[in-house]
């Protein structure tokens, strides 16, 4: 039996059994303030008419989709914590869990 014959039989049999369409999905529902997603990436930015490499910190609230981005000249923990702790304190944003993507 050839591949085309098998495919035709399986398609016909699925139709007979009423299994022609099947949707599968997982709803993504998050509690407000429950989770955030954090990521870092490199980008080029024009600063004072000069192209410079910057390191961008990106944080997104999973429930609202609201995002916060900030660029640094250096990817150091000191720069990150100084700016991020200020941002979290002034925005009132707080997450129970954060997922880091790579």
Image (tube, rainbow, N blue to C red):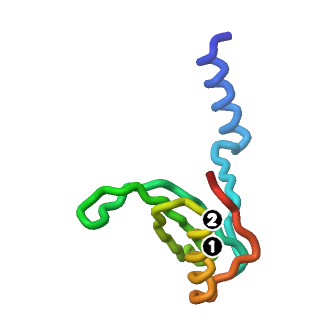
- Spot occupied by residue 67 in the image (x, y as percentages of width and height): 53, 73
Residue at the disc numbered 1: 81
Q: Residue at x 64, y 47 (%)?
A: 21
Cα–Cα span, label 1 and label 2: 6 Å
Of residues 61 and 17, the one drawn nearer to the viewer in this rendering: 61
Of residues 58 and 27, the one drawn nearer to the viewer in this rendering: 58
The image quadrant where one finds the N terminus is: top right
Q: Is residue 34 above or below residue 91?
A: above
Which element carries disc 1, helix, strand or loop? helix
Which element carries disc 2, helix, strand or loop? helix
Badge number at residue 93: none
Horizontal side, residue 41 vs residue 37: left or right: left
Q: Residue at x 59, y 60 (%)?
A: 39
Residue at the disc numbered 2: 77
Number of marks drawn: 2
- Among the 4 quarters of the image, the one containing residue 96: bottom right
Extreme-top residue of the structure: 1
> Do callouts 1 and 2 mark residues in contact (Cβ within 8 Å)?
yes
């Amino acid at each position: 039996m050839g591949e085309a014959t098998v495919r035709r039989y399986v398609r016909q049999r699925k139709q007979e059994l009423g299994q022609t369409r099947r949707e599968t999905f997982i709803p993504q529902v998050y509690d407000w303030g429950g989770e955030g997603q954090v990521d870092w990436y490199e980008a080029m930015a024009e600063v004072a008419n000069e192209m410079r490499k910057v390191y961008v910190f990106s944080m997104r609230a999973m429930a609202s989709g609201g995002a916060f981005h900030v660029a640094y000249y250096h990817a150091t923990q000191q720069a990150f914590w100084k700016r991020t702790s200020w941002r979290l304190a002034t925005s009132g944003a707080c997450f129970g869990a954060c997922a880091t993507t790579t």
